[in-house]
Amino acid sequence: MDAITQLTGQMASHLGIAGLDHLGQTASRLGLMLERGLDVQSSPPLPAAAPSVPVASEILPNASGVGAAAPGATMGEKPSLSAWSMFWQADIIVKMVMLSLVGASIWSWTIVFEKIVRLRDLNKKAEQFEEKFWSGGSLEDLFDRIGQRPRDPMTAVFVAAMREWRHSAQRRNGAAGARAMLAQRVERVMGITQNRELETLERRLGFLASTGAVAPFVGLFGTVWGIMNSFHAIGMSNDTSLATVAPGIAEALFATALGLVAAIPAVIAYNKLSADIDRYAGRLEAFSGEFGAILGRQLDERE
């Protein structure tokens, strides 16, 4: 800068005032340019800007694919909570519990439908037999028509009583004690036949009672086991978010739901069928009493 100023002074003595002003302005501009150049060289260079990358290739690996690919990767795949999925994702113990409850429910419904159809058929046959019995015809002819193969409990009671009546009538004597013993034997035979037929009719009803009492606890066992597995998985993964806990708990509660599905219809059906069978048993009791009275009157008429 001193050299430039000295040079400017020497030139001014030769150029005059006008030239001096013009030369001074030029020197000032040159000095500013040199200062700016020195400042630029003394400051560190700025880092190079990062190359621009298209958004689709930076954020979305496959920009041409479905737009839900990125949210799926961020939020995670939602677990399926359908009944079939919960069964296949459950533990082997919980699967066995579910299968046992489903099997018990299917067998319970099979028993229910079989008993409903059976009772309806028995009541219909009982009405047909009572119509023939009270028609005023001969009991001997009715026994011969029915034969030795009764089709329902009421007919079986009638056939058993008539068979005992015929066997005793062939060798009876006129003693009053013999007539009383015959009446007792006939009543005993009718009672035994009635109990045997009712036992056959009540067969497998105990399974309904057992299912209604045990199925909820079996389902609860599956629930407890499934929740234990869920908490174990939480402890292993150190993740207590609802998305992690929900599937395991849903599978566990599904076992309880199956237990209730098996138990509630079984209890309702057991109570209904028991009441219907008791009503039919009362119908057989009434018929046995009336038939015994008829046989007693015939014994009195034969004296």
Image: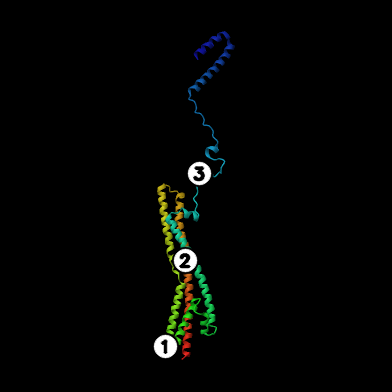
Q: Position of residue 193 (x, y in %)?
A: 45, 78
Disc number lying in front (3 or 1): 1
User: Which residue lies under the disc numbered 2?
Assistant: 266
Amino acid under disc 3: Ala
User: Which residue lies under the disc numbered 3?
Assistant: 73
- In space, the residues marked 3 and 1 are separated at their CA atoms by 96 Å
Q: Is residue 276 above or below residue 301?
A: above
Q: Specify few, some or many for label 3: CA neighbours under 10 Å numbering under 14, 14-19, or 20 or more.
A: few
Q: Specify few, some or many for label 2: CA neighbours under 10 Å numbering under 14, 14-19, or 20 or more.
A: many
Q: Residue furthest top?
A: 14
User: Which residue lies under the disc numbered 1?
Assistant: 178
Label 1's element? helix
Q: Is residue 68 above or below residue 29?
A: below
Q: How many marks?
A: 3
Amino acid under disc 1: Ala
Disc 1 to disc 2: CB gap under 8 Å: no
Disc 2 to disc 3: CB gap under 8 Å: no
Front residue of 245 and 290: 290
Front residue of 4 and 200: 200
